Image (cartoon, coloured by chain):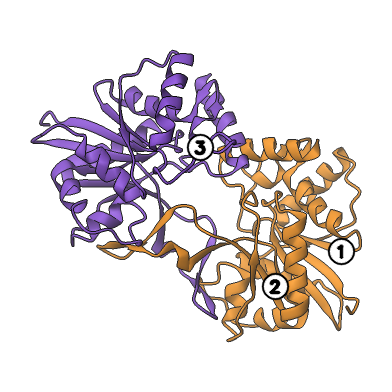
Chain colours: A orange, B purple
Amino acid sequence: MVFELKYVIIVAGGSGQRMNTAVPKQFIPIAGKPILMQTIEAFTRFDKDLKPILVLPDCHVSYWESLCEEYHFDVEHQVVVGGETRFESVKNGLDALPQIDKALVAVHDGVRPMVSNDTISTCFESASRYGSGVPVVALVDSIRRVEEDVNFAEDRRRFRLVQTPQVFDYELLQRAYCQAYTPLFTDDASVVEALGVGVHLVEGNRENIKITTQDDLVWAEVFLKKSDE
Amino acid sequence: MVFELKYVIIVAGGSGQRMNTAVPKQFIPIAGKPILMQTIEAFTRFDKDLKPILVLPDCHVSYWESLCEEYHFDVEHQVVVGGETRFESVKNGLDALPQIDKALVAVHDGVRPMVSNDTISTCFESASRYGSGVPVVALVDSIRRVEEDVNFAEDRRRFRLVQTPQVFDYELLQRAYCQAYTPLFTDDASVVEALGVGVHLVEGNRENIKITTQDDLVWAEVFLKKSDE
């Protein structure tokens, strides 16, 4: 296998977000340190040479720096200021990469610290082979489609829930992010697909949830503590 | 509001299941008692007059009875033997109901003990008004459709994940379950819909997951202990 540079762009909120009284989820400590640090470490644990690029809203940068000091967080990473949307934030992250020939770039949600080493590894392998690796999981629940006034059952076997990291060949991802933004771009796979390029799906890990509610936090705390043992 | 009898059919595995060495999930104790007891109590806590009908595989009935003794579980409930499929099990549960004129019947998965009082109440209210009440939640993750060789992004705003309890007017549900079984019947809403009758969706609660993995168990333990405090 050719040696390929590996990057991960970790997106943690656009600049539209204000620093409210409540600490944003990504900074809340679970199992001993802020979620974002857990997330970054999941990637450097996978490959110590992997280069993390952290995209933060302007207003959170100095807070993040103070947290790094407080927690003696010494994992090397680059901080980039985000845009109004997730799309813009990823674009800013990509722009911060050096002029590179051949590389694989993962894009990952800052609030998904429970990504497994297997998931990360499978996504990079797939991207190295096929140009893309997007982790998905099957549905446990039934699913319905909702239209204006009606809703109806769909066959759940035909659907997958999409997680991150979504890993791509650098050149492909760069080209995808030159397109004009549309609100249908909810993840990187949808941006790449808009080029007319299909994406390659791989198996994610079920625990790799996006921490959004208070209950998710409780569960993440339990899970990450258990993994530490 | 007219007084309406309320039933809940709790489905806990078909007769096809064997009692393996590992205890089936529904019998595993969390937060002090087996999951199935937690599930039944969620309903009698909502309404002490509600009548629970527990559908169990033949081979689990005596084990369940011994558990009820061991845990001094004194919530009144009727035990019914299940069929090969979930469809048959619900049908057996329905057949066990007395000849009734007007009633609301909930169908609930035995391994969803974290259903909230609000969800149960909203589902029954909706069924009383519209004939059906089916709890759903929006998607946090992106979603893709997978076909033989391709996969593509779908607009996640157009989908909902479906939970239980699914509550129906007794007569409607009875009629639905007279239809011939097809493998597309993954829940009761899809069975009712096959009659050509639309179902009414209400908001579920996100924690109301179907306990399927070891990690789900850990999370349920934390959640139910917290609710007890």
Residue A50, labelled with which disc? 1
Q: CA distance from mark 3 to mark 1?
A: 47 Å
Q: What's the mark number on residue A195?
A: none
Q: Secondary structure at mark 3?
A: loop
| Residue for badge 2 | A91
From what the image shows, is residue B104 above or below residue B203?
above
* For residue B65, above or below residue A86: above
Residue at the outermost top position:
B72
Q: Is residue B88 rendered to the left or right of residue A95?
A: left
In 3D space, how far apart are the residues under numbered discs 2 and 3 (Cα atoms)? 54 Å
For residue B156, say whether it is visible: no
- Residues B133 and B186: in front is B186
In the rendered structure, find residue B19 and report the number of the disc placed on it. 3
**Type of amino acid under label 2:** Lys
- Label 2 element class: helix
- Give the letter of the chain under mark 2: A
Instruction: From the viewer's perspective, tell me whether residue A111 is left or right of residue A61.
Output: left
- Give me the residue at 83% from left, 43% from top: A66
